[in-house]
Image: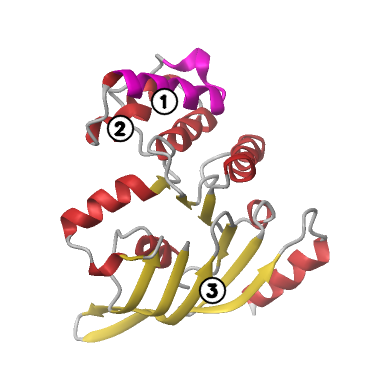
């Protein structure tokens, strides 16, 4: 699904180059749920932006479904993202003047999909995220957890094989956050969705199968988690994170 080959990302800050990602190599198989953790400035958000084609590497290759996305033109990249990558953001990024149904259908509208197909797919998705009774509500009429469920449904509108989630529970309390994590875990298991999630929360990371710890632009630890991971495993990972 994902193959990073010697990725580097350097920004020019004044006259001084600052390298955020340092020669990173990574493979993520299809259908895996991966959590990315790391201290502030470790490069985790930059890595997610590179995976989503929202930023370009200074050097290296990023293959998603065998397509080297840095080699695409802007038009080709936009088309590729719409078809292959769903995005879930911490602040939901819903359009406030659109209803739940209209927000979910927005990617399909941009793709020129017929109204009848949009309606059928939207109906499937509101059922999947348990918001059938809120389909005509506006974002301001929803709780934070409900808004994030709309964001997840919108991310799945084009049935992408990959979903990138940036702190999806960051603005939610533990109860609502757990609901979102359970939903992502269910979608991952039921439809084989590949999920890459940036999080600072060890509790959220437990829902993943694999945890990448980043520090200073490099992968410090790459751990696979068994279901029902024991506390000492997470404690060891956090000790590495804070070292």
Q: Which mark is residue 121?
A: 1
Judged from the image, the secondary structure of the residue bearing numbered disc 1 is helix
Discs 1/3, front: 1
Tag 3's secondary structure?
A: strand
Residue 117 shows up from this direction: yes
Instruction: Give residue 22's position: percent from left, percent from top.
Output: 41, 83
Q: Nearer the viewer, residue 1 or 240?
A: 1
Q: Looking at the picture, does residue 6 appear above or below residue 171?
A: below
How far apart are the two marked residues, 3 and 2, measured between alpha carbons? 35 Å
Up-down relation of residue 14 to residue 127 (above or below): below
Q: Which residue is mark 3?
A: 214
Is residue 99 at least partly visible in the picture? Answer: no
Q: Which residue corresponds to the image point at 41% horizontal and 60% vertical from the top-left? A: 65
* Image side of residue 62 versus residue 72, left or right: right
Residue at 48 percent across and 68 percent down: it is 40
Stretch of the chain drawn in magenta? 116-135
Alpha carbon separation for disc pair 1 and 3:
37 Å
Q: Are marks 1 and 3 in contact (CB under 8 Å)?
A: no
- Of labels 1 and 2, earlier in sequence is 2
- Please rate how many residues cluster around mark 1, counting C-alpha atoms within 10 Å: few if below 14, some from 14 to 19, many from 20: many
The residue to which callout 2 is attached is 108
Within the image, what quadrant is residue 127 found in? top right
């Amino acid at each position: 699904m994902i193959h990073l080959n010697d990725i580097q990302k350097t920004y020019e800050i004044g006259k001084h180059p600052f390298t955020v990602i340092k020669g990173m190599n990574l493979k993520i198989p299809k259908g895996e749920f991966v959590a990315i953790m790391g201290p502030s400035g470790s490069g985790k958000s930059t890595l997610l932006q590179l995976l989503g084609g929202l930023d370009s590497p200074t050097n290296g290759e990023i293959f998603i479904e065998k397509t080297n996305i840095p080699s695409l033109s802007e038009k080709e990249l936009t088309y590729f993202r719409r078809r292959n990558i769903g995005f879930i953001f911490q602040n939901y990024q819903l359009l406030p003047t659109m209803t739940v149904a209209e927000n979910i259908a927005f990617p399909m509208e941009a793709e020129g999909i017929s109204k009848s197909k949009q309606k059928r797919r939207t109906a499937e998705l509101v059922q999947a995220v348990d918001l059938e009774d809120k389909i005509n509500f506006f974002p301001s009429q929803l709780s934070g957890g409900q808004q994030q469920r709309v964001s997840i449904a919108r991310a799945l509108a084009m049935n992408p094989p990959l979903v990138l989630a940036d702190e999806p529970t960051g603005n939610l309390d533990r109860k609502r956050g757990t609901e979102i994590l359970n939903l992502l875990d269910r979608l991952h298991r039921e439809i084989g969705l590949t999920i890459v999630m940036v999080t600072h929360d060890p509790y959220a990371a437990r829902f993943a199968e694999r945890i990448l710890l980043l520090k200073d632009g490099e992968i410090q630890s790459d751990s696979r988690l068994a279901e029902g991971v024991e506390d000492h495993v997470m404690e060891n990972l956090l000790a590495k994170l804070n070292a």
